[in-house]
């Protein structure tokens, strides 16, 4: 009978494919902010300002003072897979930028209204242009600009009703966005960051370029957090076991929190590594049983071939080559540091 016939397979419309893909790359407002801030960092910015309205659903605006975008590149800026950061697959191995797939801006144009203003050095004025579904809506218009680029994302998920409703019904992304900027601000201590709600007088994150990491942490997370921190360092240069360099700060017993804060950068990328976080929590529980969950800032440098950066843009969780060895080494460094604390309660480690 005809009902036994299998359904016909059809090719999806390109616009449908692009919108589905875009919804995966940009799952929620904080993901858009992360992509935009990483673009600003990749552009060599020293100052990055973020403005958010309605948790990012109404407005996300990121302004930077980076190298800007060439006039000639504006027509393809928001096409899928257009990038200034990668040309050959082999280059992925040594890539220093956070972006490389040329998907972020394109994705945003499929699920929001995107406007870019930019100026390159030596120019008298900048250009402003809006994008929809990967293409420019009009010729770039001359505009006043000082330095860098401003990207404005409006009405995120306007064409994805279910996504928009879900996000509107849950707690908005603003706290997540603030948390994200705090993390970037302490790692990129030479960059000043701010984040505010649209129309608000005061910024909720405001960091200025700082000379030391501890100063940066103090300015973002506060005096009492900074006061509780101890410097940690570790390295292993034995190619037969692992090669890595680690430095960071961990809290002592005076720090109080119900949840672990772990700010982890691996090869300059903000990532998460649950195995490492758990391993450190275990050391805290064993060494300082009365202490709270820790605060950890850690920067790990590994040989690029030991980290797979070619993962999905939304996949922040990483796994590393020789992960067990690295984790054990870090555990023993932390154990030693906390053990020293235990030996004498009057002894205060300061750095
Ligand atoms: P990717 O970062 O992976 O290259 P994006 O879609 O995020 O892809 O950006 C596409 C290109 O647009 C980048 O390669 C870069 O050349 C340019 N670009 C994006 N944002 C900025 C910015 N804030 N300043 C300068 N150039 C930018
Ligand atoms: Mg990018």
Image: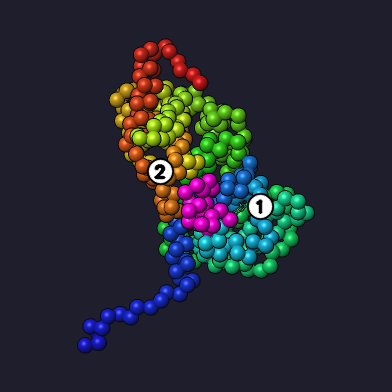
Residue name at image x 41 percent, y 23 percent: 252
Q: Is residue 95 magenta?
A: yes
The residue beneath circle 1 is 68
Indicate left or right for 9 with 299 as reference: left
| Camera-nearest residue between 221 and 35 | 35
Q: In this rendering, would 228 be left or right of 240?
A: right
* Residue 118 - label: none
Q: Is residue 318 above or below residue 5?
A: above
- The dominant secondary structure in magenta is loop
Q: Residues within 10 Å of mark 2 (few under 14, many from 20)?
A: some
Verify CB contact (< 8 Å) between mark 1 and mark 2. no
Q: What span is colored magenta in the figure? A: 84-102
In the structure shown, which secondary structural element does the residue marked by tag 1 occupy?
loop
Left or right? Give the position of 212 relative to 298: right
Q: Closer to the camera, 260 or 85?
A: 85
- Does the image show residue 67? yes
Q: Position of residue 20 (x, y in %)?
A: 44, 65
Q: Which residue matches tag 2?
A: 306
| Cα separation between marks 1 and 2 | 32 Å
Q: Cβ(mark 1) to ligand 1 < 8 Å?
A: yes
Image position, residue 12 (x, y; %): 42, 74
Residue at the location (40% across, 43% down)?
306
Q: Position of residue 152 (x, y in %)?
A: 60, 56
What residue is drawn where x is 63% and y is 42%? 47
- Left or right? Give the position of 326 relative to 13: left
Is disc 2 placed on a helix, strand or loop?
helix
């Amino acid at each position: 009978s005809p009902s036994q016939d299998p359904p016909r397979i059809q090719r999806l419309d390109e616009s449908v494919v692009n919108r589905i893909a875009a919804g995966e790359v940009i799952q929620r407002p904080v993901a858009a902010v992360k992509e935009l801030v990483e673009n600003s960092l990749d552009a060599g910015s020293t100052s990055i300002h973020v403005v958010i309205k309605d948790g990012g659903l109404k407005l996300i605006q990121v302004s930077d003072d980076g190298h800007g975008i060439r006039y000639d590149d504006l027509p393809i800026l928001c096409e899928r897979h257009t990038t200034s950061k990668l040309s050959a697959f082999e280059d992925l191995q040594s890539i220093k930028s956070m972006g490389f797939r040329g998907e972020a801006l394109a994705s945003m144009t499929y699920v929001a209204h995107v406007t870019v203003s930019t100026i390159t050095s030596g120019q008298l004025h900048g250009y402003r242009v809006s994008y929809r579904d990967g293409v420019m809506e009009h010729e770039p218009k001359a505009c006043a600009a000082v330095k860098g680029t401003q990207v404005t994302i409006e009405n995120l998920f306007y064409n994805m009703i279910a996504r928009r409703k879900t996000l509107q019904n849950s707690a908005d992304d603003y706290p997540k966005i603030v948390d994200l900027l705090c993390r970037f601000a302490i790692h990129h201590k030479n960059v000043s960051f701010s984040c505010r709600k649209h129309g608000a007088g005061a910024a909720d994150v405001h960091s200025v370029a700082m000379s030391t990491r501890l100063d940066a942490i103090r300015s973002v997370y506060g005096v009492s957090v900074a006061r509780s921190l101890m410097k940690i360092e570790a390295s292993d240069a034995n190619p037969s076991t692992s090669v890595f360099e680690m430095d960071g700060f961990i809290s002592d017993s005076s720090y109080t929190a119900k949840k672990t804060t772990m700010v982890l950068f691996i090869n300059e990328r903000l990532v998460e590594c649950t195995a490492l976080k758990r391993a450190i929590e275990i050391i805290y529980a064993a060494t300082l049983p009365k202490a709270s969950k820790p605060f950890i800032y850690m920067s790990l440098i590994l040989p690029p071939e030991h980290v797979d950066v070619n993962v999905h843009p939304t996949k922040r969780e990483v796994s590393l080559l020789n992960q067990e060895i690295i984790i054990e080494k870090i555990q023993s460094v932390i154990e030693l540091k906390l053990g020293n604390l235990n030996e004498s309660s009057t002894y205060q480690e300061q750095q």
